[in-house]
Amino acid sequence: MKHRHVNLIRVFRSPLDHRQGRLQAGNLVIPCALGRSGTSHAKREGDGASPVGRFSLLQAFYRADRGPRPRSGLRLRPIRHSDGWSDDPKDRRYNRLVPLPCATSHEKMWRDDHLYDIVIDIGWNRGPIRRGRGSAIFLHLARPGFTPTEGCVAVDPRMIRRLLERIGPNTKIEIVG
């Protein structure tokens, strides 16, 4: 089924547990996990908070060995074994995709768990990039029980493809504080 792209995805934190919430994309409403520190208006590297604000969705990455290419209006790129993401504020490539091996602190995009089987890059701290303000803020797959993330938004693996179909090149995500 073809869906129209939504202009805005909204993420609301739960009043009962600030580390969980719900994501709304048009008529699709799904539970989500948020950062272990809830949400923050003053996001910092390593604070475990999901940043509050409205952001672009820049592109999506996917593991080609773990399922078919998703359908989306976003630019899609397969994840490679050599893909990392710099989370070292001292690295000139901070908050960017980097090739592995990488001498500075980074996150591996090719993971043994399934969290990054599909990853949407949320445009947090991108224009301009400010060192120490947080990196690798993604929309990715949730762990069982929607346990908290390090600052990302995570959704049920069974729902990510339905969500991606609704995302176009102009779709924004708003994380409400």
Image (cartoon, helix red, strand yellow):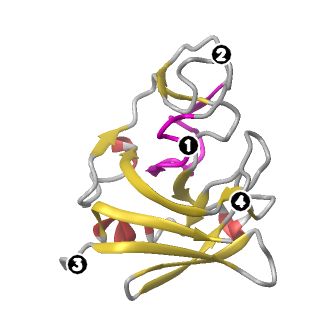
Q: Which numbered disc, 3 or 2, marks the residue that appears first in the sequence?
A: 3
Query: Which residue in the rendered view is the most extreme toward the front?
Result: 128
Q: Distance between the residues labelled 2 and 4?
A: 27 Å
Residue 107 location, quadrant: top right
Residue 144 or residue 84, whichever sits in front: 84
Mark 1 Cα shell of 10 Å, populated few (<14), some (14-19), many (≥20): many
Q: Which residue is drawn at 55% across and 33% down?
A: 95
Q: Is mark 3 on a helix, strand or loop?
A: loop
Mark 4 or 3: in front is: 4
157 magenta-colored: no
Residue type at mark 1 is Asn
Residue 41 is labelled as 4
Residue 125 is labelled as 1
Mark 2 or 4: in front is: 4
**Percent of width and height locating residue 90:** 68, 19
Q: Main secondary structure of the magenta part?
A: loop
Residue type at mark 2 is Thr
Q: Distance between the residues labelled 3 and 2?
A: 41 Å
Mark 1 or 2: in front is: 1
Magenta region: which residues?
A: 106-129
The residue beneath circle 3 is 3
Q: Which numbered disc, 2 or 4, marks the residue that appears first in the sequence?
A: 4
Q: Residue at x 35, y 52 (%)?
A: 67
Q: Which numbered disc, 1 or 2, marks the residue that appears first in the sequence?
A: 2
